[in-house]
Image (tube, rainbow, N blue to C red):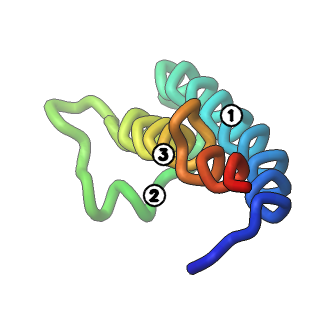
Amino acid sequence: MDLDPGTAKLAISILGPFLSAYGFLFILRIVMSWYPKLPPLLFLTRKVIPPLGGVDVTPVVWFGLISFLNEILVGPQGLLVLLSRQV
């Protein structure tokens, strides 16, 4: 797939803040998991990854995935950053 530098810069300007905000929301979700009376938000992921030893790890898994995507796409050596620098 060929992306021109302008499109890559546009994707960075959209994906960068989105992935950062989503990561922050999952940090909040991890903190909220300390309060068990809150309704579950990650029930679909829990079907795949059940609680380990009574600890819900699904928010941590999602945070790791979002951080990985953020680094791969819009990090300092991310794919979109490298594509946006092409001349």
Q: Amino acid at mark 2?
A: Phe
In whole angstroms, how far apart are the C-alphas of marks 3 and 1? Answer: 13 Å
Front-most of residues 3 and 59: 3
Q: Quadrant of the N terminus?
A: bottom right
The secondary element bearing badge 2 is classed as helix
Density class for disc 1 (Cα within 10 Å; few <14, some 14-19, many ≥20) is: some
Rendered position, 46 above or below 68: below
Rendered position, 80 above or below 71: below
Q: Amino acid at mark 3?
A: Ile
The residue at 75%/68% (across/down) is 4
Q: Which mark is residue 20?
A: 1
On the image, the x and y values in percent for residue 33 come to 49, 28
Left or right relative to 26: residue 12 = right
Question: Image quarter for residue 53?
Answer: top left
Q: Which residue is mark 2?
A: 43
The residue at 84%/60% (across/down) is 6
The residue at 61%/34% (across/down) is 23
The residue at 75%/48% (across/down) is 12
Q: Quadrant of the C terminus?
A: bottom right
In whole angstroms, how far apart are the C-alphas of marks 2 and 1? Answer: 23 Å
Of the numbered discs 2 and 1, the one sitting upstream in the chain is 1
